[in-house]
Amino acid sequence: MNLRTVLRGTGVAIVTPFDDNELVDFDSLGKVIDFVISNGVEYIVSQGTTGETPTLDSQEKLDILEYTFEKINGRVPVVVGIGGNNTKEVCNTLQRFPLDKATAVLSAAPYYNKPSQEGIFQHYKALASASPKPIILYNVPGRTGRNMETVTTLRLAHEVPNICGIKEAANSIPQCMQLLKDRPENFLIVSGDDDLVLPELAAGIDGVISVAANCFPKEFSSMVRAGLSGDFSTANKLNNPLIEAYNLLFAENNPAGVKAFLFEQGLIKNKLRLPLVTVSDALQQKIKLYLQS
């Protein structure tokens, strides 16, 4: 499977809505799924960081995944987030989870342990061997505490079967450009930094796995498609109004910011699980004013 074709464009790292009792709100999850698909995103990522997976138990993850597959019903591809800092446990999860309907697995680099580059390589090599689906690496040093260097990513891309792409969220255009220059032909590279997507599209990335696409799916996915087609005049016009939104989305916390937007749009309740809390009243007011403008 060539993920550069199947996952070209905008993927949305979808939120996990909660009800007033902090239980998974499946009705609201269905509304968000329909909202982003009807407004043009190319695929959905279930149970990424934006989905608050660190606070979900194993049964909730299974229930969410089964609901998501049923709700989407083949309309768009689904990528499933499965990661962690216990390599053996992640391998067991990859073999246990019902991934038949998944296109690929997105797996964040190990957090907290701060392994060496060789440790990161061996971690992903083990995951690739265990996974029944292609693995997309996820480099997000702002959360993991360790940057996956380009030499490590490229070593995995060239040497390890079943490593088929990367979500690059190092907030570094030079690092992204180095990956683009030296990647294998069929190796997918997507952005994980919404505010850098436009210049990274100019550099040659294949798309994005986005937070902003939860609440601005039409505008954001249209911008990405314009960039992928080389129409950067249109892409800039679509991106410029979103620049303030990017700042508001990540001003205090993700996914607190995107949940605040979705609440104001009437799609979900503004509920998170501790240790995350809702955005401040001041930021909520700025979000409300932005949506009214």
Image (cartoon, rainbow, N blue to C red):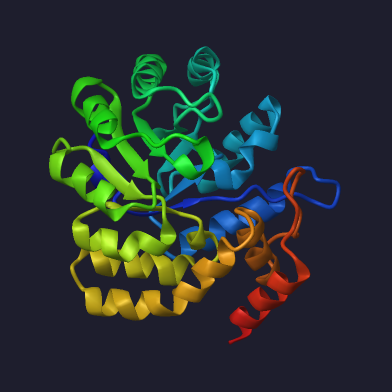
Extreme-bottom residue of the structure? 293
Query: Which residue appears at 76% of the width and 54% of the height?
Result: 271
Q: How many marks?
A: 0
Which image quarter is the C terminus in?
bottom right
Q: For this view, does 204 lie left or right of residue 270?
A: left
Which image quarter is the N terminus in?
top left
Query: Which residue appears at 34% of the width and 18% of the height?
Result: 125
Q: Measured from the top left, where is residue 103 in percent x and y?
A: 38, 35
Q: Quadrant of residue 187?
A: top left
Q: For this view, does 260 lie left or right of residue 70?
A: right
Q: Quadrant of residue 54?
A: top right
Q: Is residue 265 visible?
A: yes
Return the residue nearer the eye: 153 or 12: 153
Query: Which residue appears at 49% of the width and 44% of the height?
Result: 142
Q: Is residue 102 visible?
A: no
Q: Measured from the top left, where is residue 283 in percent x and y?
A: 69, 71
Extreme-right residue of the structure? 21
Up/down of 206 relative to 198, above or below? above
Return the residue nearer the eye: 232 or 123: 123
Q: Measured from the top left, where is residue 93 in percent x and y?
A: 54, 19
Q: Measured from the top left, where is residue 30 in percent x and y?
A: 62, 52
Query: Which residue appears at 65% of the width and 82% of the height?
Result: 289
Up/down of 293 relative to 56, above or below? below
Q: Quadrant of residue 167?
A: top left
Return the residue nearer the eye: 133 or 277: 277
